[in-house]
Image (tube, rainbow, N blue to C red):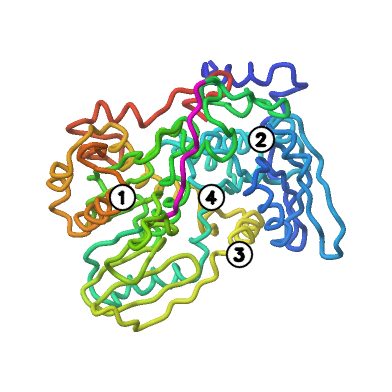
Amino acid sequence: MSHPNHLTRRRFLAGMAAASTVWIVPARAFGANERPQIGMVGLGGRGKAHIKWVMDSGGEVVGVYDPDKSHMDGATFKDKEGKVLTFKPYPDLRKLLEEKSIDAVVMATPNHWHALGTIWACQAGKDVYVEKPACHSIWEGRKMVEAARKYKRIVQVGTQQRSDPAFIETRQLLEKKELGEIQWTHSLWYEDRGSIGKTTTPTPVPDTIDYDAWCGPRPKVPLMRKKLHYDWHWIRDYGNGDMGNRVIHVIDDIHHVLQMNGDVPTRMMAVGGRFKYDDDANTPNSEFIVMQWKFPIVFSSQNLPNIDAKTGKPAGSAVYRRFGKGHRFTNLIKCEKGFFAVSRGGGALFDNDGNRIRQIKGDGGGNHMKNFFDAMRSRRHEDLRADVEQSYLGCLLLHTGDISCMIGKPASVDEVSKAVEGTEEGREVWKQTVELLKANGVDPNVEKPTLGPLLTFDPKTEKFTGDFADEANKRVREEYREPYTIPDRV
């Protein structure tokens, strides 16, 4: 008997000729010198950049899809001779996935489409390069892994720092205990982001946009923000705030360099809030997560500006001020004999007095797409630098901590201070957060932060246990809108 969710998918494909016979197809074998044929899904700023990356890495873009027709109209690329190339537009994602000549899709969609788009592509016999974060929530990430393995697809996630030599070398140095035992880690990404504005009536959706397809698995509700594109990052139904936009890179770095694999942290809490701005966003613009693994692990995001002490005016992004000098995005790994400060493109090792003792060179992970194409040829997902399973497990660090913040309650400065007092770097991040809030004219005892509860997560069942488990587990799996549903059995 067919599973009822499979029937939902058939209904979704109703009206398409022979849909049930073309949806699952074998991989096309291609030679070492043959260019993979790529379909681009999502053609906003990141998607357009991917066109160049695909072509420069040895692939060939042959088709494009975006629910915003104006994005497809602007999808062009200049080859080495300066000739402008245009690509075949597809009016529907399903039509692009049916195209037998396409070997793989590169997805640069909003987060809420990552899982469903990847699963559909795997079922259609396509390999997938999907942007970070791998998934919008925990349960759907596991479904992505199941689909990749069931249909024997190569699925790479766009956490390109896994291909950066700086992090590969960092992993090796940590394994050799170059600076002794690790005491704690803190991964941060600070970027000034202003208000997205406040609407009182729905914003008209341009005629160029298929809004039903854009909403996909999420509720189709009136557009209550000024801009449809990009500002979705700060709307919980579609994005994961800057934690899932920028900080996920350094979150994934820690999962990578510590070689966690499935041994992810089991205890976590978070503190966050949306401060200073009264706007339509509903994700924090200041947040930090504290996790207990073999040692404390901290992740933090700040979207409020640094304030010049002399002028009182905004002066770029906030900076971290304890170890190193003026970090805005990095991974700090504190060890017995010093610390690592490693970010995209490189970093260094320092002694405990802050003296540089070793340089680490990187390239930003520029060969990440090529690594994807190489694995497509070998048909070995083990050859991927950011295989969907490892990237999903990295996402667990994002989602489990973020869930604590989502179910938290308003708290005073003293209450938060007490909650983080047992973690040295947690205390420091909270201290700097309070200073930044006050510099931005925010009294955190009036505009209170959200203090998330300490949660316990079971990596085997991928569910929460113990105190607050019932409320936290409601966030593990989302509700999906038909016909854009993710089946229990992919």
Q: Judging from the image, what secondary structure is the residue with disc 4 in?
A: strand
Prevailing secondary structure of the magenta residues: loop
On screen, 32 above or below 359?
above
Residue count near mark 1 (Cα–Cα under 10 Å), binned few <14, some 14–19, many ≥20: many
Give, as a three-letter code, the residue at label 4.
Val
Task: Give the quadrant of residue 167.
Answer: bottom left
Q: Sequence order check: which comes first, mark 4 or mark 2?
A: 2
Tag 4–tag 3 contact (CB < 8 Å)? no
Q: Residue furthest front?
A: 311
Instruction: Report the disc number at residue 264.
Output: 1
Residue labelled with disc 2: 124
Residue labelled with disc 3: 367
Give, as a three-letter code, the residue at label 3.
Asn
Q: Position of residue 116 (x, y in %)?
A: 55, 33
Q: CA distance from mark 1 to mark 2?
A: 32 Å
Q: CA distance from mark 1 to mark 4?
A: 19 Å
Q: CA distance from mark 3 to mark 1?
A: 27 Å
On screen, 403 above or below 153?
above
Q: Judging from the image, what secondary structure is the residue with disc 3 in?
A: loop
Q: Is residue 373 left or right of residue 292?
A: right
